[in-house]
């Protein structure tokens, strides 16, 4: 399987388990596209990807998403 790097996790946000994802997807992400986002694969160790399943993803700024 081929993975595409879209950004990096930069900080936690609040106390409800949200994380800020800084991305390179572009300034105008459509809400419908975010609803289709089911999982992110995080590379914790080189060439080893672990799936993290999302409850929600919401735009924070033009280059950041809040993911839970």
Image: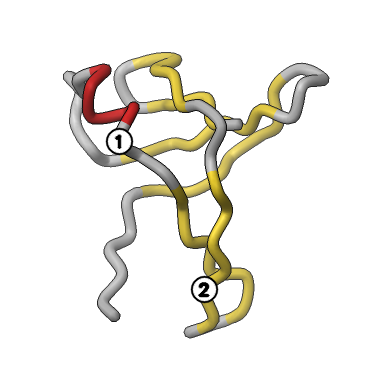
Where is 41 relative to 11, above or below? below
State the mark number for residue 36. 1
Left or right placement of residue 27 versus residue 13 in this view? left
Q: Residue placed at 32% from the left, 28% from the top?
A: 34
Seen as rendered, the residue at the extreme bottom is 47
Q: Coloured how?
A: secondary structure
**Image-quadrant location for residue 58:** top left
- Residue 36 placement (x, y as % from top left): 30, 36
Residue at 82% over, 20% down: 15
Q: Earlier in the sequence, mark 2 or mark 1?
A: 1
* Nearest-to-viewer mark from 2 and 1: 1
Q: Residue at x 34, y 27 (%)?
A: 35
Vertically, is 65 above or below 54? above
Mark 1 residue element: loop
* Count of marks, rendered view: 2
Callout 2: helix, strand or loop?
A: strand
Where is 2 relative to 67, above or below? below
Q: Around disc 1, counting alpha carbons within 10 Å, would you say few (fewer than 14), some (14 to 19), or many (20 or more)?
A: few
Give the residue at the far right of this rendering: 15
Q: Residue at x 26, y 76 (%)?
A: 2
Query: Mark 2 packing: few (<14 Cα in 10 Å), some, or many (20+)?
Result: few
| Front in this rendered view, residue 14 or 62 | 14
Task: Name the residue carrying label 2.
Answer: 49
For the C terminus, the quadrant is top right
In this rendering, the answer to whether 68 lies above or below 38 is: above
Q: Quadrant of residue 24?
A: top left
45 lies left or right of 6: right
Q: Position of residue 25 (x, y in %)?
A: 23, 38
């Amino acid at each position: 399987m081929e993975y595409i790097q879209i950004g990096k996790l930069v900080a936690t946000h609040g106390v409800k388990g949200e994380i800020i994802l800084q991305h390179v997807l572009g300034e105008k992400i459509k809400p419908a596209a975010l609803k289709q986002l089911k999982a992110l694969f995080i590379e914790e160790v080189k060439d080893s990807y672990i799936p993290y399943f999302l409850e929600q993803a919401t735009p924070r700024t033009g280059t950041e998403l809040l993911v839970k």
